[in-house]
Amino acid sequence: MQYWALIVDCFRQSRDRKIFWVMLIMSIIVAGAMACVGFEPGKVTILFGMWEIDTQWLTAGGGLREDLIAGIIVDILMDTILGQVGIILVIIATAGFLPTWMDRGSIDVVISKPMSRWGHFLGRYLGSMAFILFHAAVFVGLTFLAAGLRWGCWIPGYLWSIPLVVLLFSYLYCVSALVAVVFRSTVAAVMLTLFAWCAFSGIQVTDDLFTTTFPEWQKYRTAYKTIHLARWIVPKTQDITYLAKRYAKAAGAEEFMPADTPENDRRMMEGAVKVEAERIAMSPVYTIGSSLMFEVVVLLLAAWKFARTDF
């Protein structure tokens, strides 16, 4: 019951922030924009038929290719808008939860309550998870309904994007929590979390270049082994999109590769297609399990630091 009270209090605090309402309005606008677009066999209509674009790309057997629609939804909506823009906004919104909570005056009241410091920290952490869970559910829920009601494409696997986005945020928020406890600075929490996100993604991209796109680079054994080991250790943030595509049964990147791709770019794009196919086929237990191990270690370190701090 005490944990639930902490989670509710943290969520209520988040509602007082403008970013909460910005994200809510963003979800409504995106769903509304989807409703203005129509996919029909042989054409795409914009603004309820005001403009029409003739195309056979989305058509198969006289109907729409739902795998292509799912690919567009996952790549543009789930990955770019919610998984990148949305996550950045949530990082900014939640970065101040712990530093302001640990200010003198506020923290004195908190630690005076009959609950362990570890419990207080965990409740606050789960409260931030509730923030992203709410917005992920609203965004995915509205866009799921828009695709079904407006386009006639019901993609139940797309709903897996809700827990996947929460999972992605948790990989990053453990870093934000640790930085917040150590430095008690909102700015430091935001900047170092975004830096960590770039580092995690950079390690994964580099490892993919070594293993799939340019295997001849593996002659640099030390660099290759270091990157490969680092990939196993850090959270697999980029795998979230691949898992979303897997569960939504979305079309792969090869379906979106232009036929007239220049030769210089084709190898890179073919490498990306191969990487995507391998990642979609991978075991979720590996990517999620190894990422959660990192998160648990960082979270325990942050909780230990909070419990040992002399306020």
Image (cartoon, grey):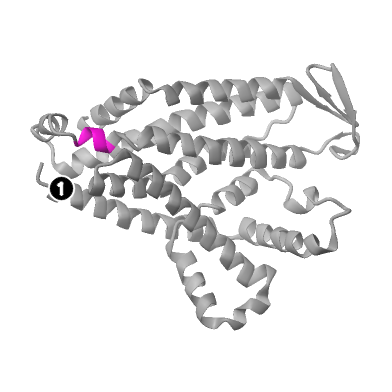
Quadrant housing residue 210:
bottom right
Quadrant housing residue 8:
top left
In the image, the segment drawn in magenta is 98-102
* In the foreground, 70 or 87: 87
50 versus 270 height, above or below:
above
What secondary structure prevails in the magenta region?
Answer: helix
Q: Position of residue 67 (x, y in %)?
A: 75, 42
Picture residue at 55% right of the left edge, 49% below the top: 240
* In the foreground, 15 or 194: 194
266 versus 165 height, above or below:
below
Picture residue at 47% right of the left edge, 74% below the top: 226
Helix, strand or loop at mark 1: helix
Picture residue at 44% right of the left edge, 60% below the top: 234
Q: Quadrant of the C terminus?
A: top left
181 versus 266 height, above or below:
above
Residue 268 included in the magenta stretch of the image:
no
Amino acid type assigned to the residue bearing label 1 in the image: Ala
Q: Position of residue 154 (x, y in %)?
A: 69, 31
Residue hosting label 1: 307
